[in-house]
Structure formats: C-alpha cells, structure tokens
Image: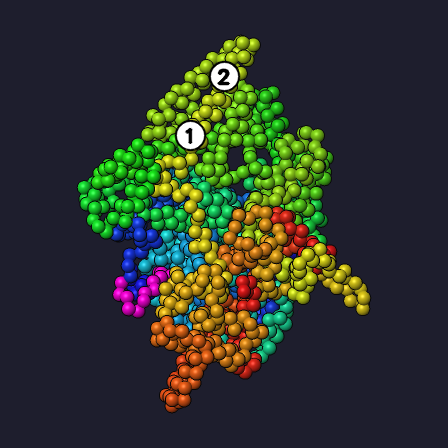
Amino acid sequence: MVLPGYETFATLFTGLLTTAPPPFIYIHDVSTPHITSSVISSVLAALPDNPPFLHAIVDASTCFTARLLYDTVTQKLANWTPAWESGCQLWGDQRWNDNFDGFIHGLRAISVERSKSSTTKTRGKTTQLTPKMAIVIERAERLKEFLPDLLVPLSRLAESARLDLTIILISEYPWQELRPLVGSAPDPLYVRPPELSKTDTIQIVVNYFPQDESNSHNPVLLPLYRQFLSTLYDVCSPFTRDPNELAYIAAARWPGFIAPVLDEYRRLRGEICEDSGDAEEEEFELTAPTEDARIRLIRLFTPSFTTALEALYPRLSNATDWAADNQPQRNLLSSGFSGANLLDKSVLQTSQGSLTDILPRMSKFILLAAFLASTNPTKSDIRMFGRALNERKKRRRGGVATSRGGTVKIPQRHLGPIIFPVDRLLAILGILIEEYDVDSRPPAPEYKLPGEYSDMEIRRVSTHSGVMELTAMRLLRRVSPPERLDGPPMFRCAITYDVALRVAKDLGVPLNDLISEPT
Amino acid sequence: MTPEQCLDDLSQTTVYIPYSEPGEEETESYSSCADKDLPGGYELRFDSYKQAWAKCFTRMQEVSHAIYSPVASNIVAQIREAFTNVLPGLPYPELPVFAVSGQSGDSPILQNVVVQLEDGNVEDDVTPARVAHLHPADCMNIMLTMKSMIHGFVSASPEGSTKRKSTASLAAYDIELLNAWYTYSVTEQEGMQLVVVMHDFEQFEPKVVQDLFNVCSLYIPRLPLVFVLALSSPPEPSYLHNTYPRATLALLRIHNITVTSHVEVVEQLLVKTFFDPAFDPGIMVGPVTLDFLHDYFTRHNRSIDVVTTILQLAFMKHVDEPLTLFLFDSNLNCSNEKSALRKLTKPESFPFLEYLFTRVLSSQTGQQQSRWKSDRNDLSSLLGVITDCRVNFHEQCQKFRVGFCLLLRVRKFVLDLGYKSVESGEDGESPMAIMSRGLRGRLTKDWKHLGSVIKKLNLDQLSGLLDALEWFFADLPDGVFEDEEKDRKWVERKRASLLGLGQASSDQGGQAFETLADEVGEWFVEYSAERLTRRLDEARLWDIWYTGSTPFPSELINPAPRAHITSALLHPESYADQIPCFAKSDGSVSNDVEGEAPAVWELPDTSILFRGYLEAGKMINVFDWYQSFAAVLETQRDKELRAGDQKKADGSPCDEAAHERRRDSDEEEMEDGEEMEDEKWGMEVQARFIRGVHELDFMGFLKHTGRKADHVTRTVFDVTEQ
C-alpha cells in the first residue's frame, strides 16, 4: 500500500523505473527520509516481475566496511539468506566481496543466474530475459563517512557492470554535500519527494492505529482518534511534522486521553448490568462518545499535549513510562472535572538520585571549582580569590558589561566553558575548601598553620582520584590526551550553570559572588 | 609469589619489591615492635588476621547480596518483559535500554543481574537469556564493537563452534551472522533474549555507540536485543541526553534505574556485620575507625569497595599488636596447650612473655597481682586468664550488641510514629554516628529520652512497641536467646497485661495503662543502661579483640605524595632514622641537637640541590646550580677533613690558625698529589651533581624545555615549609 500523499510520486517513480530507468537517482528528503524509503521499497516490491526486477535495499549505517556492503547487496539481490547450519555460506560458488571488481562480477553472476530461470517465448523462440536491478542505499550520507572511496564507483555502477541497473541513494542531505571533490561522479537524477500536508500526515499516523477489539484501540474510536490527532498536529506542528514523532507522542497520550471514555463506558455497563442482570452485558457495546463529550475531552487534554511534546520529543522520558505516569484521575468525565488537576499530574517529577545526592562532598567542591575555572577568565583569579592579610573584603565584583566601544561583553558562561589546567583547578579548590568547608572537617591538631589543612587536602590522592572519577563520569572533560605526560592535564567543565548553582546551594557556597561576571 | 613471578604475571597490576641492602640476603621477619614480640609472631598474627577478615568479608558480601538481590530481581523482571510490555501504536519498535546509574567497575548489582538472567527460571518457564559484555577497551571502532558483541553471543553457545570458511561466509562483524545464529538457536530455546551489558558506559566513544544502536535498532524485534548500560554518572543531569543526539535517543526506550543510595547500604552493612547479635566479627571496630570511615565515605569516595578496604586496613593494623596472637585461642597456633607452653618457655620468647606478664598483671586486682607475682611459672594459668578474658569480652560485646540493636529498633519505632525529637543532631543523625557514639558510651541521653517518649505513648502505640520488642527477642540467635530469657519473659507478661487492659473499662484501665507505660519506659532505660553504659574498652585486655580508639592509619588510604616528597627533601633528618641508608656512615646526622635544623652541607646531595632549586627563579641556570652545589660540597669536604684531622690529633687542642698553617704547609709539600686529588674530586662533584639532578628530574621537579640553553624550568613553586 502506498502511503497517503505519495500516490503521484509513487506512480511517477514506477513509470520511471519500468520504462527507462536512469543509472543513478538521488532522492533528497530533508524532513522524512525514512517515510520516503518505505515508499520506495513498496514501489519496488510492486514492480512487475516480467522481465524480473531485482532490488536490494540497504542501510548505509550498517555497512561500515566495503565487504559488508558487497555482502548485503549480493545476498539481497540473489534473495539468499545465509543459514547457520551451513556455516553461514554466502550465495554463489565464488567469493564476491574481495573488492569492487569482485562485486561487479557478483552482480553479473546474479544477473546471469536469474536470466536462466526467466524466459519468454516470442514466436516459438525462447529468449532469456536479462533482469533489471535496483540498489537502494538509505542514509547515503553515511557512505561518505564509512566508504568515501566507493561513492564514485557506485555512482557509475551501471556503466562498469554493463547491466541494466539503477542505483538509488536516499538521504536527508543534498548531493552536493556528498559528492566527492576529486573523481568524476556523474550527476544523478535529482528527485525531491512531495511535502506532506496536514491531512496526509494525519492519515499516515492513523495507519499506525492498531485496530483491535481491545477497548482503547476499538475501531469505533477511530473518528475520535482522527480528531485527537488533528489537535495534536496543531500543537506540535511548529516543532515537528514528522509522522513518526507525531505517532510516538500520540501513542503515549492516547491511553490517558481515552481512559475517561472507557471509565464512562464501564460505569454505564455496570449500571445496565445491575438493572437487567448479566445477560445483556455482552450486548452493550462501546460507542464513540458524543460530540459534546469529544469537545470537552479535547479541551481538557490540549494543555497536556504541550507537556507531552516537551518530554517526549527530546526523549526525556519514553512513551511507555510517560503514558503510565500521566493517566488522568478515574471517572474524569462523570466527576465535575477541572483542568488544573490534570495538569498537576502531568508535571514532570524530578527524578531521585540527582547529582547532589550521589557525589561525595569533595567531588562537589571539585566540580564547583572546575565550573569556576571554566567560567572565570584566568586573569580574574587573583582578583576573585586572592587573599592578602585582612584583605578579604577588598574583593570587588567584576566590571559590569558595558557597551563602551560598541561591543557588548557576553558572559563567559554563555560562550561555553574555557579550558583550564589541573593546577588552576586545585588552586581554586584550595580556596573553596578553606573558606567553605572548615566547619565540617574532622579535627586535625597536627596542622597548625592557617590554611595548611586545605593545602594538604588538595594534594591528597583522593582529591586527584576525585578529579579522575568526575572525568570518568564525563562531568569534567579531559581535553589533553592522556598519553601526554609533559605539562599538566587540561580539563573543561561539562556542567551547566543551573547544575553548578544546585551544587553550590548544597554546599553553602555563594556561587554568584565567585563568578567574575555575574548576571 | 616472589617479585620475579609477580612481574611475569599479567594479571598483577602492582608488584611490591621490598628494599633490601645489597649485602643482605634475606630480610628478617617484619615486626613493628620487636622488643616484645614472639619469634614468628608476625606470621601467626597474620594468619589470625586472615581468618578474622575472611569471616567478616564473607558476612559483608552476604549482607550486600541480600540488600542488592531484590533490586537486581526488579531489573531482571523489567528486562524480561522488555519486548512484551510495549505500548500499542508506536510507529516503530524501540531498542530497550536500561541505564543503571551509580555503577562503578564490577558492581555487585550488575553481576547479580547477569547471573539471574543467565539462570532463567525453570518454574515460570523462562528461557535463560544470553548475555554479552562490552568493555570500552574492546570497542575502539564500530567494527570491533560489532565483532565483540556478536562473538560474545555466538561463542558462548554450544552451537557456536560451527566451522565457517572465513571468506565465503558472513563476516564476523556482520549482524546477519548474529541473525542467522539466532534463527537457528531460537528453535530450541523459544523467546531467548539477547542482553548486551556495556560496562563503564561513559568511556565508550559516542560515535561508535551511535552506530551500534543504529545497526541494532534495524534488527528489532527480530533479534530481541536489550542493552544494559552501567553508568557511573548520576541520572540527573543525564549523561545519555547530554551526549547523544536526538536521532539516536529516538531509537531507544531508555529506562533509568537508580540504585539505592550507598549511604543506607553502608549503614546496614555495618550494623549487620558489627552490631548484629547473630554474628561475631572476631575483631570489633572502634569508634575512631567508624568515624574515619564515615568521614571518608561521605567526603571522598562513595563506594562500597572503599568501606571494605578501610575495614580491612583496620583489621590489619589491629594485628600489629603482639597480643593479638590470642585473637581466637590461647594456644599460639599450636595443636594443644602443652606445645604452646613449650613455645613460650623458649628463651627467644622471653620478651614477649615479659610483655604479656606486664599486661596481664596490670589488668588484675591487687590480690590477684600478688598471687601472680609469687607464682610466675604458672604459665598455664596465665593462658587461662587470657581465655577467661576472651570469654568475658565476647559476653560483654554480645550484650552490648543486643542492647544497641534494641535501642535502634525502639528508636526506629518511635521515629516512625513521628517523634522527631529523638533524632539528636540537627537534621537526623546517621546511624553511623550513633554507632560511634554508642561505642564511646555516650548514648545515655538517647535512651533516657526514648524512655520518656515511651511513657507518653498511647495504648495502640505501646502495644505496637511491645509487639516489636517481642519479635526482637524472638529473633535473637540461640546462644543469646537464653541469656535474654528474663527480659523476654518480662516483655511477654507486660504485653499480656496490656491486652487485658484493652478489654478493661476505660476509667480504671487508664490509670493502669499509665503505670504500665511508665514501667515499660523504666525497664527500657534500665535495660539500655545495663548494656550500653559499660564501654568495651573497660574490659580486661580489650585491645586484643577491639580496635578501640587507636588512630586509623589514614595516610595509607589517602596520602599526599608530593607534599611528603617535598618535605622529605627539605627535612631529610626527620626521615633519616626511619631509612637507615640516609644516615651518613660517619654519623654526622646523629650529632644534631634535637630541634635544630642541620646546616646545608650536612644534607644529602639531592637535598642540597633542592635547596638551590628553591632559591632559583622560574628557570634554573644549570651551571650556576652546579657551582653552588660544588661550593657546598667543598664546605662538606673541608668539615669532614677537619673532623678527620681532629680524630687524628686525638683530641689535642687545635685552633683554626694552626690548622690552616698546617694545611698550607701540607699543600706545598704534596702539590702534585694534590692536583691529582683535585681532579678526582672535581669528577666526583660532577658525578654527584648529575646523580642528584637526575633524581630530581625523575621525581618530576624539572622540565627540559630547550627554550634557553643550559637552563631547566622549575615545576614546583608552592613550597610552604621553608
């Protein structure tokens, strides 16, 4: 079945392939390449079998070596599945995956093999038909990464193999991005599939609706589902129009959306059963809710569509969990419902085990020191942290960003973290623990000089291993290669301002006073 | 294993090569206090340490297993239904991914999960899953990753050995191979899941993992692949969401699993190991160790391994004490008492015996002391005393444990009722702190307060408390059960009378109830006071079984190597008596007056160079450095010569001028010989300089930048102690 919105495209494409297939087609689809791929594959599957039309659809992301590409294409063209019992033997009596030459020979061998089996009789004379071939490569942009040398040979495959063969690349990038700079790749036939309209998109998503007799996916509810999708589309279309994404969000929201209807149905059924005994129970069937109820439902649930989009589009939560977490309260329709209750429930709860619970105290200080080292410019360190005797209060806040000279200074934390050596990190750490960690320390009478304890603490093994552990957690990024022994290792902090603020609050450190350019 | 064997063994990460003087063949048996130790005592004590530690370690593993296995079962259950419990209407199947956070290294939870997955469940007819492990080191690129994943599945199966021709069959990194294998083996084992465990997930190259997920998601659900990721980072902020693009995340169905906070696990671990009446750990840890453990755990490293290491170290440190020979029995590892006595009466054992006598004598009362003094040869009764002490200590320890557990139980009960006031400290004291306070005998306030709270409980609450107490006594292990007979009976009686009260009329019952509540409160205070007031270190010879308040060797766990190296270079004299090779052969170090720093010329070469190093600027001119070094060595040579002369003069008065004169005349006489000697001396100075510089270089104090000829860069500037 051809997907809605693609009917004309499919007819044209079929015509193109059956009459005079060009050797090289490039399909560029910016928004929904996976849908286009599925359309192409359904077109190919529906092609007439006389003369035979062999096709292979491969995903370039799975073909990370040339051998994999050759193997996958030949096996699919030959319609051969390697079996474990026979030692995963590949098709043919020869090896086709050695190099590009072998691959071409393999293609020819397949062609010869198929032409033997397909014959046609014209005027009593039996002639063998040479099969046509199509090789579809999805996510073709990955070819450039994995097999850049093969792009030119592949684009000229029909020429070099002397076969009636079409190579079709599908990608979300334009051909100009992929075309190798050197080497002569011929220009492909450039195809742009149609943009999907709202009705087509909704129709595609409706196709995913698993129609079974179970209550929530009863075919009776299909009109309501369509209406539901239409509203969902309106909410989501500024951000995504991908049918897959819409279907994903719809799948997560639908069980909650339909639950009040089902509750109502169960309640009514219960009442009827009480009235007339068990006999009629089966006859009472689920019906679509009235127009009035539909409007009420949609009005009630529309705010939660945005919440669903926010949580599900970036995959902060998965659909299954989200659906389970966002069930509306029971018997919503019959009880006097208010939208506020529903929204309260759908607010994402902050998960347990956040950074501040898991990290040991010293690691939090290290993280904070790293954040400061990544945010404050090096030259501000003495101003921010320098401490002469009795000069603690002299520290000034950093200059306010002025528009003098026409340039506005952008705070460093909006420009991304800067790189710092580990020594700088430890120096800032020393200041931090000296100022903010004194009270929680165990007594250590052996340190008499002021600051000696902190000084020892930052040189201890566990401090260094704390740095390494945070790096292992990727909360710090090591910028210098680990094999370089010369010079201090360089790091960059990988936490955001918000996280740093939370950590600082946990430790009782006034973070904003320590940033040289507070907002 | 000898060091040579260790060096050949690839599995060893660290090899200890003990220092031995060139002349010495075999190092003596180690002993920290040789003057009061038994010959071979160290080995004997080490054996008893091993015994005690093995017992304790097994217990800790059992406890942590018990804590973790429900968590693991929950994860396993979720993994099992990863492909059945799917939301209907999804546009494409998702790859189930379980992100278990807070895991470092080989975590017990993951091991547990893997074991349960591979076992399957015969009763519920669950096919065991196949598990493949991926480690970052094996996954440098997508080809290797796929290869090791497929190999992990295929090679572990009995069918995996099918011969394949390498060229004419599928490549070893082709997922079709896995597909073919799965189609073949699933006919026998229906519904077999393929679980991929990715260890240290943060260390994987994100690009490779993206490709891996891409490839695998195309084969879902034909291949029921489930990924389990061991993350060491916290779930919030999520590493997965920060690192991977939306396109990859859209392929996955991520379940975040957070494991119970480690703090609670450690608390349970400690309570179950050291404060459980059902278990005797052999060596009881003291409050200082517990405090250190608590501090280190919350401050530096929140892992269970660290707890194990600290306890192990505490055990090891404990057996340093010679008397811990008597940790488990009084027979000194001999088969019977007789041979033990024979061992003690050998002349080499006398220092130990002497020490033993002193200790035992000081722990006796006056009358016993006099009896002991009169009959010093009665060694067997001496050993008998130690046995008595052991029994005594264990009894007291057991009583303490019962009392402590009861206190914890009552505290928990009262806390659950909402009496927040029983929590001492600002915002809820951790049980770890209570343990340490309990061992210090500072819980009086707690039990008195709890007692007064009990008196205020109402009827239902009190009956609940008495129920809890009855269960507590019923749960006690056999040996203790009988000892607590009296209190157990008392609680039972009170409970019975409380039940009677419940049926009695309200007015009369109210009065009776109040008296009953008072009684229970009083009883609790008395019971706790009886068991918890007496500290463990008040028992006789307690230091054999109890680490008490001996300081924990924290420098071993958390040293500051750079600070120590610098301070050793600055003040070698304070390290010299520990390392004999540092002391000069002529004993020039030893003639120092205590507290007075030695002059520069008295220091070892490297230290002299280090002094020069500290005085230099950012870059050091090597030649200048050499000259200053040579000058110091000149002084050193002079002083040594003079000291030699003084010895020759045999104490005769020798003033400076006379000495100079004599040296001058000597020089004239033997000018030729002197020249030869000077040349030799110059060579020696050069050699010593080079050696010293190399030593500093080796320790990382120098950097050769080549920016300026004959200069090296300093790397250390912040030296505090001058």
Classify mark 2: helix, strand or loop.
helix
Give the residues in magenta: B9-26
Density class for disc 2 (Cα within 10 Å; few <14, some 14-19, many ≥20) is many
Residue at the (24%, 45%) spot, across then down: B333
Asked where in the image residue B671 lies, by quadrant, the reply is bottom left
B335 or B469, nearer to the observer: B335
Residue B159 horizontal side relative to residue A389, left or right: left
Q: Name the residue under label 2.
A: B516
As for residue B372 lying within the magenta part, the answer is no
Q: Mark 2 lies on which chain?
A: B
Asked where in the image residue B276 lies, by quadrant, the reply is top left
Residue A78 is situated, as x and y percent measured from the top left of the image, at 44, 65
Disc 2 versus disc 1: distance between alpha carbons? 22 Å
Q: Which residue lies furthest to the bottom in this view?
A: B672
Q: How is the image coloured?
A: rainbow
Which amino acid, by three-letter code, is at mark 1?
Answer: Arg
Residue A346 is situated, as x and y percent measured from the top left of the image, at 65, 41
Q: Name the residue under label 1.
A: B531
Q: Which residue lies furthest to the front in this view?
A: B653
Residue B635, placed above or below residue B186: below
Classify mark 1: helix, strand or loop.
helix
* Mark sitting on residue B299: none
B16 or B659, nearer to the observer: B659
Front of the two marks 2 and 1: 1
* On-image quarter of the N terminus of chain B: bottom left
